[in-house]
Image (cartoon, rainbow, N blue to C red):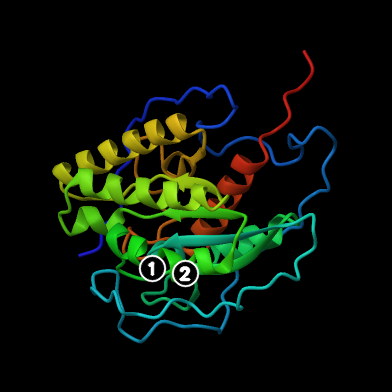
Amino acid sequence: MLWLSSLGSMAAVSSASSGHGRAIPAGAGLNAFASGAPTTPRPSVSASATSAGPASPGASASDPSPSDPAPSDPAPSDTAPSDTRRFVVLGDSLSAWSFAPGGTHPTAIGLWPTVLAAEDPGLVLANNAGIPSNTTSQMLSRLRRDVLDYNPDLLFVFGGTNDVGQGFEISTTLANIREIVETAKGRGITVVLLTLLPVNDDYEYRNEARRQINAALAILAEQDGILLVDSGAALSTWDGHLAPEYAAYDGLHLSQRGEQALAEAVYIALHPPVPLPS
């Protein structure tokens, strides 16, 4: 069965000398962003359902379906403006699916990558490579086809949830993610890691596994000088549960509002608020 992560209390990660390798929770204002100069205000984007790419009726997070096709995305293109960055999202159903309010089945392709691209004029979505039920081992096996062949500038890695649900060794999950990171960086791709999300009721041993994975991701990000988005902090309540307004019916996946919140958390991580003058 597919379960989400319980983030627990993860220690804050200090900035590496390069200024990366830090956990970025949500909560800061969205009116000004660090870029050395005033930025163009991002457009307001709503996470409304679309009719494209619905999941098969009856599909659920617990269905092990590694062979499910990835959402349909445009073929690799070199036509993006020179001042934009093309990105790929490598993940599972948390990136592949979207749930309408009160809905019990996915109604659209995962929205957060699309919302992020719409909110950030400097980004172009090259491929949403989220496949339901995928583990990090499966993500690694399709890295070339679904990521490298698109020649992106930026890669978001959002995986590990199904590893915990299927009882993978934590060391296996971390080794897979590290190989993904190193392979992508070797191709000149900037990598951003997302931590596992909290869950609203699960076994404590799974919660502990998620906490260990998230803590290890923070260390990996610091060591490699890459950005870590603290997804759990952005979408959780004070006691570490997935906020009801962001949770789908199962308390595991994200509602459309949750996908909007995740996109905004990633946007803030990419554009930290400008400190006010002292």
- Residue 105 location (% of width, % of height): 38, 77
From the viewer's perspective, tell me whether residue 65 is left or right of residue 186.
left
10 Å crowding of disc 2: few (<14), some (14-19), many (20+): many
90 and 113: which one is in front? 90
For the question of whether residue 152 can be seen, the reply is: yes
33 and 150: which one is in front? 150
Residue depicted at x 51% and y 46%? 192
Residue depicted at x 24% and y 56%? 163
Tell me whether the residue at label 1 lies in contact with that at label 2, contact meaning CB atoms closer than 8 angstroms. Answer: yes
For the N terminus, give its image quadrant: bottom left
- Residue 272 location (% of width, % of height): 66, 35
From the viewer's perspective, tell me whether residue 41 is left or right of residue 14.
right
Label 1: state its secondary structure: loop
Q: Amino acid at mark 1?
A: Arg
- Residue 247 location (% of width, % of height): 41, 58
Provide the residue designation for mark 2.
146
Residue depicted at x 46% and y 83%? 54
For the C terminus, give its image quadrant: top right
- Residue 231 location (% of width, % of height): 46, 45
From the viewer's perspective, tell me whether residue 111 is left or right of residue 272.
left
Residue depicted at x 57% and y 50%? 188
**Mark 1 and mark 2: span between their CA atoms?**
6 Å
Provide the residue designation for mark 1.
142
Q: Which residue occupies the extreme top position in the image?
A: 278
Q: Which mark is residue 203?
A: none
- Compared with residue 31, is residue 1 higher up or lower down, i.e. above or below? below
